[in-house]
């Protein structure tokens, strides 16, 4: 063994990366192309100046609010001050979705799916590519390794395959249910580009779409619905920059929502979201755009029937966004996948490619 | 085409990130503390992304270019790197390190890591960059030359000096 091999063999190595953190890093880096030359200086200086100014003279800027230094105001202003071109045939959104799936009875795996969505021409076309599946914990890894050859696994059934799901428009408002329960993929049936840029007006506009499922459901259900529909619209539908800022203010003012911030992100957390989850909306401070959505378990318990318990705050799903914008490019739909039945929405098995 | 002003991602650069992020993170993480390494790995790709118009494929592949950026960033943390080697020289590798177990039957790992760390701390920056790009990155002499922006012969001479110093520190005969 020569000196070079010896260095490589004996010097301490690094542990594997956290895929979620890596995906967030990836999204942050790719988002940098939206910044101008020396753009890394501008947000840093702007953030520092804004923070110092707000901290020093809060009474001169705004009445005492819920946050002495208001990161929501910061990202809302950044979002509102960033007009964007609004032309193109499709609104295209690209993200990585991390979710839990059953591996064997009583075990879990974490799946990463790379997703591209096109909304336009009265359709939502969703391209899914299963990118990775890893055991959630050591017990799951053991089960994985002991899995017999015929063990059903997404890796064997979907590996390196792309799937196209195609829905007609108006999915968002066609049904009175499923809009605020993940996974919800709002389509193009609402004029989201015409939504107001004022938080109160935006809230009133959104509530015109609200239908109370049962008479017994009270205001808390309505707030759950408002949170869900807002974060999904923000993340997946086109809105103007003014509306994006209004959404942030609206969400921060919903009951129970907590705000925390670090150097890179502002996170709005709703700890009592319907379905027993804690929901995070992660906003990139530099761009004012949505960086990720997350949902955690509130308490220990099984995720699938007859499964082992998961610890509290286990991430159930995370969507890390890497691109959003208008495009004239059409999705490349494989032959035989074109939608033939406009309603109800169709998901065709023929659309595997 | 998606208008650049709106698009958040660059599919081409996303591919570069997916292909090389792990190895760049690992390279930096073996020279600096992991917390710093993750930030520097991200900064490496941010810089590469911003300067991507300067990259000329005719001058070599993108991999040494990324390693070169990472090495320059590590250079800003030279004192931290040296402190790390000196700490390892005193205490050996952290408990549970896999590499430590693999060589246990050859030589006492603590002693080896300690001596190696002390020797790495004693190299010049240029010598250390060359030998660690080869050891950790698996770069060829030509790729190291591209990464550091030096001549091929400079790489060879720096490597030769570094190996001599390491052998002396480890007590290995020529």
Image (cartoon, coloured by chain):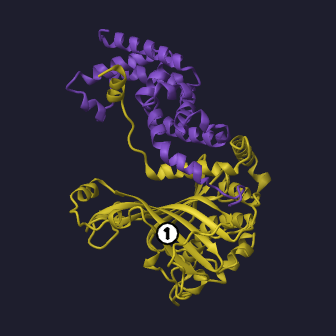
Chain colours: A yellow, B purple
Q: Nearer the viewer, residue A73 or B108?
A: B108
Q: Residue at 53%, 50% (x, y): give it.
A: B15
Q: Residue at 66%, 39% (x, y): give it.
A: B51
Picture layout, residue A266 above or below residue A193: above
Q: Residue at 45%, 74% (x, y): give it.
A: A275
In the rendered picture of this protein, how many numbered marks are placed on residues? 1
Q: Is mark 1 on a helix, strand or loop?
A: strand
The image quarter in which residue A224 lies: bottom right
Picture layout, residue A178 above or below residue A271: below
Question: Circle 1 sits on which residue?
Answer: A272
Chain for disc number 1: A
The image quarter in which residue A296 lies: bottom left
- Please indicate whether residue A276 sits to the left or right of residue A291 in the image: left
Work out which quarter of the rendered image holds the C terminus of chain A and state it.
bottom left
The image quarter in which residue B116 lies: top left
Residue B36, horizontal then vertical, whole percent: 51, 35
Residue A241, horizontal then vertical, whole percent: 73, 63
Q: Which of A339 and B93 is in front in this view?
A: A339
Residue A113, horizontal then vertical, whole percent: 46, 62
């Amino acid at each position: 063994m020569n000196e070079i091999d010896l260095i490589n063999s004996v010097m301490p190595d690094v542990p594997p990366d956290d895929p979620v953190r890596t995906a967030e890093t990836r999204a942050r880096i790719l988002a940098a192309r939206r910044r101008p030359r020396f753009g890394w200086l501008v947000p840093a200086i702007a953030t520092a100046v804004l923070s110092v100014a707000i901290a020093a003279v809060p009474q001169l800027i705004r009445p005492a609010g819920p946050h002495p230094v208001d990161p929501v105001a910061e990202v809302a202003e950044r979002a509102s001050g960033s007009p964007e071109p609004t032309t193109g045939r499709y609104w295209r959104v690209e993200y990585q979705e991390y979710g839990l799936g059953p591996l064997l009875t009583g075990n879990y795996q974490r799946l990463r799916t790379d997703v591209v969505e096109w909304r336009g021409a009265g359709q939502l076309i969703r391209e899914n590519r299963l990118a990775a599946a890893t055991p959630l914990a050591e017990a799951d890894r053991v089960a994985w390794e002991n899995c017999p050859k015929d063990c059903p696994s997404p890796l064997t059934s979907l590996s390196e395959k792309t799937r196209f799901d195609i829905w007609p428009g108006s999915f968002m408002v066609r049904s009175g249910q499923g809009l605020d329960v993940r996974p919800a993929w709002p389509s193009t049936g609402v004029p989201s580009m015409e939504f107001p840029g004022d938080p109160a007006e935006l809230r009133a506009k959104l509530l015109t779409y609200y239908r109370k499922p049962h008479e017994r459901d009270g205001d808390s259900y309505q707030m759950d619905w408002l949170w869900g529909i807002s974060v999904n619209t923000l993340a997946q539908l086109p809105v103007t920059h003014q509306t994006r800022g209004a959404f942030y203010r609206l969400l921060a003012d919903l009951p129970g929502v907590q705000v925390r911030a670090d150097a890179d992100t502002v996170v709005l957390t709703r700890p009592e979201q319907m379905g027993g989850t804690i929901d995070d909306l992660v906003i990139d401070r530099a761009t004012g755009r949505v960086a990720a959505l997350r949902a955690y378990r509130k308490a220990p318990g099984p995720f699938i029937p007859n499964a082992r318990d998961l610890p509290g705050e286990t991430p159930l799903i995370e969507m890390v966004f890497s691109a959003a914008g208008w495009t004239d490019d059409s999705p490349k739909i494989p032959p035989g996948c074109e939608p033939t039945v406009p309603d109800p929405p169709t998901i065709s098995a023929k659309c595997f490619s | 085409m998606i208008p650049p002003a709106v698009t958040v991602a660059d599919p081409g650069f996303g591919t570069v990130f997916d292909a090389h992020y792990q190895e760049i993170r690992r390279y930096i993480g073996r020279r600096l503390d992991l917390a710093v390494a993750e930030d520097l790995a991200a900064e490496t790709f941010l810089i590469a992304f911003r300067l991507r118009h300067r990259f000329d494929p005719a001058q070599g592949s993108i991999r040494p270019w990324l390693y070169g950026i990472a090495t320059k960033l590590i250079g800003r943390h030279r004192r931290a790197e040296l402190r790390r080697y000196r700490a390892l020289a005193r205490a050996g590798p952290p408990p549970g390190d896999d590499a430590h177990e693999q060589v246990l039957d050859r030589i006492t790992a603590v002693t080896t890591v300690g001596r190696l760390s002390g020797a790495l701390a004693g190299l010049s920056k240029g010598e250390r960059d060359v030998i660690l790009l080869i050891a950790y990155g698996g770069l060829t002499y030509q790729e190291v030359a591209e990464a550091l922006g030096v001549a091929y012969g400079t790489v060879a001479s720096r490597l030769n000096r570094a190996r001599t110093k390491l052998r002396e520190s480890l007590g290995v005969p020529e």
